[in-house]
Image: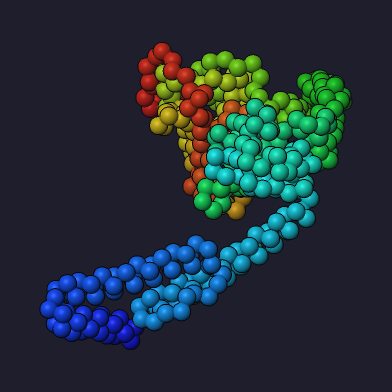
Amino acid sequence: MSSTWWVELRRLLLVLAASAIIGALAGALTAALAAGLGLLAGWHIWQLQRLRRWLTHSRRAHPPETSGVWGDIYDQFYHLQRRNRQRKQRLAAIVREFQQSTAAMPDGTVVLAPDGTILWFNSAAQDLLRLRSPDDLGQRIINLIRHPQFGEYLSRGLFQDPLELDSPYENGVRLSLQVIPYGREQRLLLVRDVTRLYRLERIRRDFVANASHELRTPLTVIAGYLQSMSEDDDPALKPWRAPVEAMATQAARMQGIVQDMLMLSRLDDQPQPGVEETVDIAELVSMVCRDSKAIAESGLKLACETDHTLGLHGCRSELHSLLANLVANAVKYTPGDGDVAIRWYRQDTQACLEVSDTGIGIDARHIPRLTERFYRVDEGRAREQGGTGLGLAIVKHVLQRHGGELEIESQPGKGSVFRCRFPASRVIPLRGERATDGPACG
């Protein structure tokens, strides 16, 4: 037992002893003991009142002087208060440093509560979002940034990528907004002026589109003359037969590149898909399989499994291009004795379009960059196969426009799997029966 409790015990014994002596002398022992215990209880009540008054009005003052357990309680409270004050001072210093550092940032920074109300923002956010201090503190951010895309961005809760939109306050200004969750369901909204980058990207897209469009006519003329020369039986052209055929092949390849570049430019210019309709993906699979047989090596097996009850809301031409590019890649890089399989199926609430092959496969280090424009794993082999290096970039853009995701699984020498996942919002039921595995498509 600690010394403070010994002091308290002695105080109790002294009160009881004094009360007993007084009660024995007065002939009222019980009343004296009760009076003594009452005085002791009153003293404890007085100490409780002193503690309450000190905690309420004098937290920074030294605690009242006393002995025993109450002295120990006062000391414990005093040291706890000092530790809390020191902790608050450290936290306040951290908050000041955070505010000073973010205030100096050129990007706007807004601290949001779990319900979307504004807790704090820096001067850059005031300029970019036209926020006012202190009037807008405590306001919901959705009420101040009235933009449909921003509201949808917050409601979805998918903050991996930033959202780009035109400034609702200043014409010609492009803003990038990204929400970063942290702490206890709090969020940090970062706002950046990307007008210059957006204009440069626009200039690049316009240049590529215009250059590709201007190249179409001369390439068509060149390809036409080369085809005529290759089909001409004039003996004088016999020595030139091989060079002409080689030039015709390269001209056709350039036409394919121009066509893909024009399509990518069109996909870049339009954030949403073209004319949307209910697309029977099973029918598209059958059509692409028939077309792919013309470029497949002899002995290559094409098989498909499609769910005819499963449709998709989207742009038919874009989805056809997506599937055609995936199947063309699988056919090109799979040897004649290999297999290419196409699956269209439902997985939970999503729909999946999957193209797998037993081809040469891809090393893991190349997979993150496969959808980049003109990126090739093997430059020489890709050119020999006539690839443009834009097929998977088109696939990526079409999927983004349809709210889908691309998954790639591959191992060198064992083949690849390209899986396109479409969200439940685009899945449409069709009348029909689900097809089972078949030996061939089309």
306 to 94, vertically: above or below: above
- For image coordinates 29% across by 82% down, the residue present is 11
Q: Residue at 36% across / 81% down in the picture?
A: 68
Quarter of the picture containing the N terminus is bottom left
Residue 355 visible at all: no
Outermost residue toward the top in this view: 431
* Residue displayed at 35% across by 67% down: 45
Residue 110 vs residue 4, the one in the foreground: 4
The answer to whether residue 345 is left or right of residue 213 is: left
Q: Nearer the viewer, residue 166 or 207?
A: 166
Q: Is residue 142 above or below residue 216?
A: below
At a point 74% along the width and 39% down the height, the residue shown is 131
Outermost residue to the front: 26
Instruction: Please state which of residues 137 and 386 is positioned toward the viewer in this rendering.
Output: 137
Q: Is residue 436 above or below residue 203?
A: above
Residue 210 coordinates in the image, percent (x, y): 85, 27
